[in-house]
Amino acid sequence: MNNTELLHQLTAEVKDVLQTAQKLARLDETTLNMQPAPGKWSMAQVIEHLNTYNRYYLPLVAKRMPAARKIQGTATYKAGWLGDYFVKSMYSDVKTKGVIANKMSAMKGHIPETLLNGKNVIAEFMADGEQLLQLLDAAKQVDMSSVKIPITIARWIKISMGDALRFLIAHMVRHMHQINNLLVSEKVG
């Protein structure tokens, strides 16, 4: 795929995610922390779950980006098979059918507390989203395949920086779909 088109698509997805986060920022703490059913995550918990991934991936991408090969002109991006698998498992059904078909359990270390300061959680997420937009802009100048990033579940497994960014954003899109469903079902936002 064309590197520029990929980064344009990822940037648009992050901007959409941030628009939903802005809606959430206007909600009160009770609404943000309301669990739709026993054992189901509140909107604040969903965002905090995303924050745990941002805390891991964003510093790594920022640290490793300067080591990536510089590109000039039009470049192509080739996804790795493992990175592509992770991305597709995150949101292929969301993108094609508008549903989250494959339910997944959160990994240890990414399960949020039950009661959170929702405003702080959302503020952190929005600040991370702005940093992510800056990283995507900087990625226009580099070969995103030339640097590897260890994944959270097994740090000895590495995927390309481009696939790490694709995964992180696919994960956000997946969970924002979940939040949008909550907003509709609760008639808030």
Image (cartoon, rainbow, N blue to C red):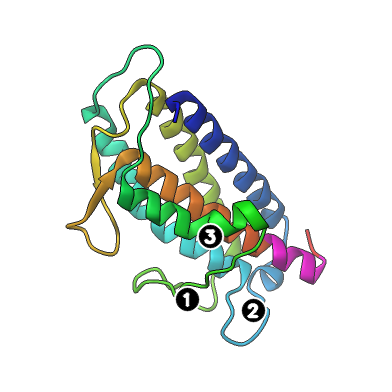
3 or 2: mark nearer the eye: 2
Residue beneath label 2, please? 35
Q: Amino acid at mark 3?
A: Val
- Indicate whether 173 appears above or below 183: above
Task: Indicate the position of residue 21 as horizontal and vertical percent values.
Answer: 63, 52
Secondary-structure class at tag 3: helix
Sort mark 3 into few (<14), some (14-19) or many (20+) by Cα contacts within 10 Å: many
In the picture, the disc for residue 183 is none
- Indicate whether 79 appears above or below 138: below
**Residue 181 covered by magenta stretch:** yes
Residue beneath label 3, please? 121
Which label's residue is closer to the chain start, 3 or 1?
Answer: 1
In this view, the residue farthest toward the top is: 73
Between residues 121 and 153, which one lies in front from this camera angle? 153
**Residue 57 covered by magenta stretch:** no
Q: Is residue 146 visible?
A: yes
Task: Indicate the position of residue 97 as horizontal and vertical percent values.
Answer: 66, 57
Task: Indicate the position of residue 165 as horizontal and vertical percent values.
Answer: 40, 43
Please provide the residue range marked out in magenta: 180-187
Q: Amino acid at mark 2?
A: Gln
Query: Which residue sits at x=45%, y=38%?
Result: 131
Between residues 144 and 115, which one lies in front from this camera angle? 144
Label 3 to label 2: alpha-carbon separation: 16 Å
Residue beneath label 1, please? 113
Between residues 171 and 64, which one lies in front from this camera angle? 171
